[in-house]
Amino acid sequence: MTTIREQIETDLPIDDAFAYIADFASSAEWDPGVESAERIGDASAPVGVGTRYRLQVRMGGRTAPMEYEIATYDAPHRVVLNGEGSGVTAVDDIRFERTESGTRIDYTADISLGGLLRFVQPFMGGTFRRIGEDATRGMKKTLADRAENARGERP
């Protein structure tokens, strides 16, 4: 297993940051490693435990399908998603903390490769680290843009 830990801060209020990130259909907007993301099932139901998502994740020169399901949903403090597909399992544990200026987000992803891929996992640390850094950089920029847009909408 490889563990990736990243932390960002945003000016976006905690409720807004949580609602946006916890709905993993947004992941294609902020994670450059996700080609597409969609919610599976009743789109009118509230996001919560059991909500499922289908993602197309970039892996090398190809895309691979993964499905994620929310396992823990403690708004606006924590969401845990379990992902599986294409020989990869992942647990994404995302925690949100209110700060004076907005929100601190702690993102931990535990990634395990299965099948024959498990033999290359010890050599993938740098690759997984770059994937995590790219995702959090994208998250930070997208949340900053959303905060800026929210400020522009206020009278």
Image (cartoon, rainbow, N blue to C red):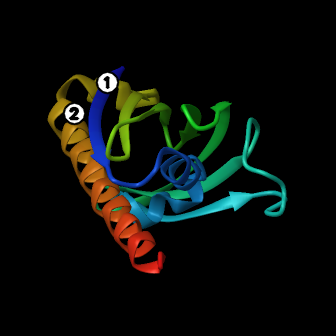
Query: Residue beneath label 2, please?
Result: 124
Label 1 belongs to which residue?
2
| Closest to the observer, 124 or 43 | 43
- The image position of residue 113, as x and y in percent, is 41, 30
- Does residue 120 appear to the left or right of 63 in the view shown? left
Lateral position of residue 55 relative to residue 31, left or right: right
Figure quadrant of residue 39: bottom right
Q: Which residue is drawn at 37% across and 59% down?
A: 143
Q: Nearer the viewer, residue 134 or 57?
A: 134
Q: Which residue lies furthest to the front in this view?
A: 155
Q: How crowded is mark 2: few (under 14 residues within 10 Å), some or many (20 or more)?
A: few
Residue at (58, 38) in percent of width and height: 76
Give the residue type at disc 1: Thr
Which residue: 25% across, 38% down? 128
Q: Where residue 131 sits: x, y (%)?
A: 26, 46
Callout 2 secondary element:
loop
10 Å neighbourhood of mark 1: few (<14), some, or many (≥20)? some
Q: In this view, does 155 lie to the left or right of 24?
A: left
Discs 2, 1 touching: Cβ within 8 Å:
yes
In the rendered view, would you say 60 is above or below 72? below
Q: In this view, does 144 lie above or below 131?
A: below
**Hey, which quadrant is residue 9 in on the image?**
top left
Q: Is mark 1 on a helix, strand or loop?
A: strand
Q: Which residue is located at x 31 percent, y 62 percent?
A: 144
Q: How far, Cα to Cα, is label 2 from label 1?
A: 8 Å
